[in-house]
Image (cartoon, grey):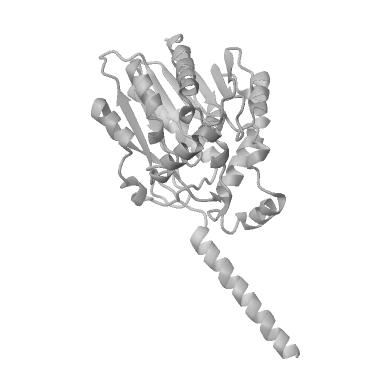
Amino acid sequence: MATTLNLVGAAAAATAIVGATALRLSFAPGDELAEDRRAEPLLVEELALQAKYKFEVIDLPVPSSSSSEPMKVHTKYYYPTTESPKGVIVYLHGLNSHSGRITEFYNRSLRDGWIAGMMDFRGFGRSCGRHGYIESIETLAEDAVAFVQATKAKFPDLKLFVLGTSMGGLTLLHATLKMPPGLVESYIFHAPPVEISKNVLPPKIVELVGRVLLSLAPKLPLLKPHSAHSNSPSQEALVHHSKLVDPNFYQGRLRIGTAYAMLNASLAIGDKLHEITVPHMLIHGTADRVCDIAGSERFFATSGATDKQFVRIPDGQHNLLQEEEKYWHFYLDTIAEYIQARI
């Protein structure tokens, strides 16, 4: 009997070791090249934009956490038809998305005479990294600072504005604390997750399992994504279809490391809001079910900036650019008027 129990115990231990090893090999931390995503075709809207405006694609070299060789972050600039651009506006995308999905914003900026710059964060779009995986928001913030520095060096005589939406807004909050002074004229934060809505937080048991697996397999896709809460019911089907036909939109479950990178960054920035003294505008829909507007209210009240604005969009959902026309028109007009007043 004892021998049988010992054999069963040994078999169970061996199975656990094999399983843990398999998890580690498949979902361990570290950078990846992601050349498959770089080769994906552009969206129809991106092709139309490229047919209308001059553009430039530049691979930004960034440090790797697991190799001595630098990794590639995909960046791009679109140029307006005017010979005298008003300035430059850089866009930082949200979670699971990429820089090619907001062509309405680029079209408006280019028509108004602005150079539009954009980057795909590591793990998203055409940049390096496992699709949908974030090791640290601090790393993304450092990449954002590097892109802003490269952009200012490229256009030294033009005023530079930076817009970050959702995760891009959270990254931008952290980036402002690292940014050398004098580079950016003003910042625009759209629905930064200073406070994550309870609608998208996982059950406690899932959170506990995630914490156990975090160090072993941070790239493991485990948590239900927030996508279902990003838009109003009238727009959900249309937005969902746009994601299905976009190979560079991450459609899987939220990876464990990504979830904790977001949560840790949200908690960390909450203690540093008073240190944010840069000029900025904050935009948030009052019906946002992903990033609670209470977090933005706290940010606006606490930040150390003297030049700041808070625009609340009544009944606006999280993903304002894919809502009814009245919402995204108001959103684009708000940004256009803000940057125009500062040139």
Image quadrant containing the N terminus: bottom right
Q: Is residue 69 visible?
A: yes
**Residue nearest the observer in this picture, 97 or 268:** 97
How many numbered callouts?
A: 0
Can you say whether 237 is above or below 323 in the image?
below
Figure quadrant of residue 104: top left
Position of 108 with respect to 309 (left or right) is: left
Q: Is residue 182 visible?
A: no
The picture places residue 253, in percent across and down from the top left corner, at 53, 50
The picture places residue 203, in percent across and down from the top left corner, at 69, 49
Position of 251 with respect to 78 (left or right) is: right
Can you say whether 142 is above or below 186 in the image?
below
Image quadrant containing the C terminus: top left
Figure quadrant of residue 285: top right
The picture places residue 309, in percent across and down from the top left corner, at 58, 15
The structure residue drawn at horizontal position 66% and vertical position 47%, both measured from the top left corner, is 202
Can you say whether 27 is above or below 54 in the image?
below
The structure residue drawn at horizontal position 46% and vertical position 12%, both measured from the top left corner, is 337
Position of 78 with respect to 20 (left or right) is: left
The structure residue drawn at horizontal position 67% and vertical position 51%, both measured from the top left corner, is 207
Can you say whether 134 is above or below 24 in the image?
above
